[in-house]
Image (tube, rainbow, N blue to C red):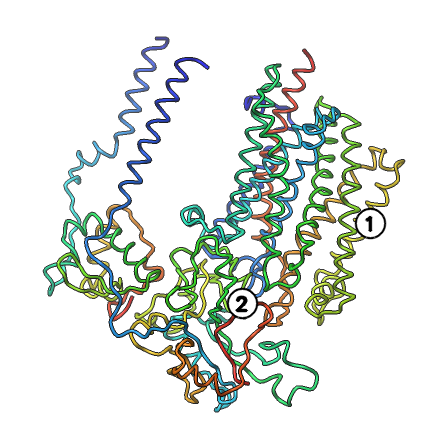
Amino acid sequence: MLEKALKGGRRYWTLIGVLAALISMGLVAYLHQLSEGLTVTGLSRDVPWGFYIAQFTFMVGVAASAVMVVLPYYLHNYKAFGRLAILGEFLAIPAVIMCMLFVFVDMGQPMRVMNMMLHPSPNSLMFWDFGVLGGYLLINVVITQITFGAEKKGVPPPNWIRPVIILSIPWAVSIHTVTAFLYSGLEARSFWMTAILAPRFLASAFASGPSLLIILCLIVRKYTKFDPGKEAIQKLAEIVTYALSINIFFVLVELFTGLYSHIPEHVHHFEYLFFGLEGKSALVPWMWTSQLLAVTALVVLLIPKFRRQERILPFVCVAVVTSIWIEKGLGMVVTGFIPSPLGGLTEYWPTSPEILITLGVYGVGVLILTVLYKIATSVREELEVQ
Amino acid sequence: MYDATKIIIGLAIFLVLITFPFWFSIASEKSGYVPELKLPENQDSCVESKEYMKALHMDLLNKWRDSVVRDGNRVYVSSAGKRYQMSMTGTCLGCHEEKSEFCDRCHDYVGAEPYCWNCHVENAQEGN
Amino acid sequence: MDESKRSFLKMAGTSVLGTLSVACGSSAVGTPGQAEALPGGLSAKKWGMVIDAKKCLKEEGCSDCIEACHKTHNVPKIDNPQEEVKWIWKEKYEDVFPMQAHPYTQLGLKEKPVLVLCNHCESPPCVRVCPTQATWKRDKDGLVMMDQHRCIGCRYCIVACPYGSRSFNWSDPRRHLNTDPNPGFPTRTQGVVEKCNFCAERLAQGLKPACVEACPAGALVFGDLEDPQSEVSLVLKEEHSIRRKPNLGTGPQIYYLV
């Protein structure tokens, strides 16, 4: 089926060209980082994790969100998602690959990455995260290969794929739960030491992932002959609405426990985020923007007249994705380190090499996504003609 | 076979190119080159036999590394019953004082770039 | 599937399995010799240290322990405080013991510099999170060790440490060594994490930790916490001591007399 990705119009090849350029720039920047060390990033002794790990956290959510399509379609036979399911699964694959790449570019000694497999450490959540992410990638590759392969041939898929598909549902939940556990079991970091971190991660994933999928569906509808279906897109919008409202509720719930109890360890981080601490306030405008985008998006989505307007939908979805990207990426990872264990207030901002490398990794992900979507839409277009 | 001539000629060119390293070095009379190693003056034997060290010095060093770093055992009792401190800087470089006249001779020739010395100190005195 | 495809796959699978088993077998080569511990080393069931903050800084600005440690272990001197590598250093009392300091703390105590280093915790979160066991807690004496050969530089241990004890090599540390390195200890390389190792290599040779030896005021006392006659046990029996962030359950083994 890969040959479908080798035939395309001018727009397709321009996109591939742009992505290739982005990837090359990222690669050059990465080689620079390899030779000089991670000093080229904005990371520091007080803020050891930043942009790369933030992108990793966000993309795990996007990868997990495929479950929001798989569950209704395969478990509850929601037929409208029939045309959409493959697009959701084909989004999960590059999302997981990007997760792994973001962690790889963050490592100080990437050549030693095999040590994680040579010396398995079940006590470490990072070990489990790699296990479940690798497994999820495998599951999605197998599912898409088998189901889409069968669809292309015009036959029903073999029976044994159904339990694998059902397995992908709790597995999707597990990848994001394990990622949350990476953070929420650390006694050192009071900002993350909350049981609601895993539910928050899942809620924000189920709001941002399907939003991204809606945007992709609208793009696919506009630029190819394949239409995922108005009802399917509407159902996704409803899912985003529920997930977003739960996510905002969770944020408010967290703010309550911190601000009402007045425990310094809990309050300080929120103070830093929304008001600044001792003059350090780099994230304040971002956080308020994020909340404003989320609330506005929710209000629009809650009104059926607006939610059904497909012209408004792309803007609302961009607002949701941006809001959650800020909240999960900048707002969650970096804030865990401010204040530091010894009370230091070291702010963090990504440097140009860091941004170039990040864009390079996104380039790889979008390239894989483009190729997979090209295959899916080309095959579907042909099938529809028949 | 279709296009038999083209394929056979192509295969022949491929074989010539792929075996280039072999026939070129034989032809240029460099294949007999053996790196010249400066051996320590005061010692007539290494920690283990020459044959063992030639083939397996990295194995030995890996075991030394795990023994010192992970097990906390710093003394090696060789197969000949002699005791040595398991230390690259202290023991190995204690005899092979000039790394550039011993270790590097073979490593440079075969293109091996062991990165041990990024951390382990190269002056041959008491040390690791 | 084609018969020929099936038999090809069978043959390919068997050859891969065969090669793998040969490869695994051949890597289990042992050395012809044996390993032993160095004779005359210091040993303990549980190493611990007492830092007497009242005796410390007898001379204002004294940093003898810091200099001794950093010189012995080739710790680089990095100007940018955001990328410092430090094994032992001073912080203000109110930052070391945030739950002890209050608005009416004894005059001068809040800003008083107090020594901090790796606490070699009983329940170390850094060990719990390490994905390669590049850091582990030694069974025989409780020290939290580092294996620089195995560290992949993921910095999860730095994230997990509640005391800020660990440093990452953001660049090549050899560029920041002002003097010739001490050949008795390796330097580190870019991309790995490091921290105080309680001078495990000195203990193995029967020597005291460098910081303890260097202190002119006798403010640092170390020894076996499980030996009731050791100096450190006797001091702890007599004096009031506190630990850093005791509420976190890490069980630090560095005790402070403040």
Is disc 2 in contact with disc 1, using a CB cutoff of under 8 Å? Answer: no
- Residue visible at 50% across and 79% down? C255
Residue drawn at (24%, 60%), measured in percent from left and top?
C35
Residue C237 in percent (x, y) is at 48, 84
Disc nearest the viewer among 2 and 1: 2
State the separation of the CA atoms marked 2 and 1. 40 Å
Q: Chain of mark 1?
A: A
Q: Where A21 sits versus C44, above or below?
A: above
Disc 2 designates what residue?
C250
In percent of width and height, residue B64 lies at: 28, 58
Name which residue type carries label 2. Answer: Thr
At a point 68% along the width and 46% down the height, the residue shown is A202
SS category of the residue bearing label 2: loop
- Quadrant housing residue A274: bottom right
Residue at 63%, 56% (x, y): give it. Answer: A333
Q: Which of the labelled discs sits on residue A295, or is there none?
A: 1
Give the farthest residue toward the top. B1
A269 versus A96 height, above or below: below
Q: Quadrant of residue A144?
A: top right
Residue furthest front in the image: C228
Q: Pinpoint residue A163: horizontal percent, then vertical percent.
A: 59, 28
Quick one: label 2, few (<14), some, or many (20+) residues within 10 Å? many
Count of residue discs? 2
- Mark 1 surroundings within 10 Å by alpha-carbon count, few (fewer than 14), some (14 through 19), many (20 or more): some
> Same chain, marks 2 and 1?
no
- Residue C109, disc: none
In the image, is A37 to the left or to the right of A209? left
Residue C211 shows in this picture? no
What quarter of the picture does the C terminus of chain C occupy? bottom right
Of residues A288 and A257, the one nearer the viewer is: A257
